[in-house]
Image: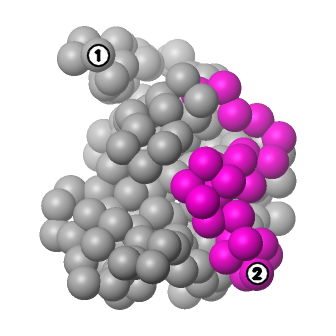
Amino acid sequence: MYFAALLARTEDGWEASDMELDDVESLSDLIDLARAAAVDDDTVVALIEQEDAWFGVVRVDGEEDPRYFVSNASAASRSSYGSMLTDELLGSDEEDDELDELDLDGTEDGEEDTISAFTDLGDGEDEEVGSGAEPVPAGPLGDPRLLDDLGVSHKQLMALDGDALSEIADSLGATEVLEAVR
């Protein structure tokens, strides 16, 4: 079971809208939804979670390149929407983002993906996250600093578990608007 919401920053705080994942067939679709929710090209934060297995954050600031964070890359890579994020972060060569090739119920599809790539550790250094037959990393992946300037430090983001989206919304001052779409 997935939950997804968009938080759009406005002059008066945050506006939330639930995100209908049935309409999202690729990461580009997700980014387009986020940009469409933006008020005056301000920041939009897309939050996705699959029960307590993993959560993902996508930050879109106007026309700048989106930034991504996934709490548990291994778990996310085995779900349809999470694999879109992990594939982007790991630089997957797969060009076909169609969901008809993905497992929509969030269960494992058998073997784990094995991708060789590097991930940004947030301190200017890269770390190899997979090579050959090694699985996708079990821990966080992406830019843990993507919400630093919004009140969620990278240390706080990396330590979140359980009801992570509510904790993020609380730090952003968007608890009420997020709960309204939950």
Left or right: 31, with 170 as reference point: left
Vertical position of residue 159 compared to residue 47: above or below = above
Label at residue 123: 1
- Is 159 one of the magenta-colored residues? yes
Vertical position of residue 9 compared to residue 126: above or below = below
In the figure, residue 115 lies in which quadrant?
top left
Vertical position of residue 29 compared to residue 152: above or below = below
Q: Where's the N terminus, which quadrant? A: bottom right
Label at residue 153: none
Horizontal and vertical percent position of residue 110: 73, 41
Question: Residue at 45% across / 79% down in the picture?
Answer: 12
User: Which stretch is magenta?
Assistant: 158-182
Left or right: 33, with 35 as reference point: right
Label at residue 180: 2
Magenta region, main secondary structure: helix
Question: Residue at 80% across / 48% down in the picture?
Answer: 163
- Is 172 one of the magenta-colored residues? yes
In the figure, residue 34 lies in which quadrant?
bottom left
Observer-nearest of 116 and 43: 43
Sequence-first tag of 2 and 1: 1
Q: Are marks 2 and 1 in contact (CB under 8 Å)?
A: no
Question: Residue at 60% across / 60% down in the picture?
Answer: 173
Q: Secondary structure at mark 1?
A: loop
Q: Secondary structure at mark 2?
A: helix
Observer-nearest of 71 and 174: 174
Residues packed near mark 1 inside 10 Å, few (<14), some (14 to 19) or many (20 plus): few
Horizontal and vertical percent position of residue 70: 54, 41
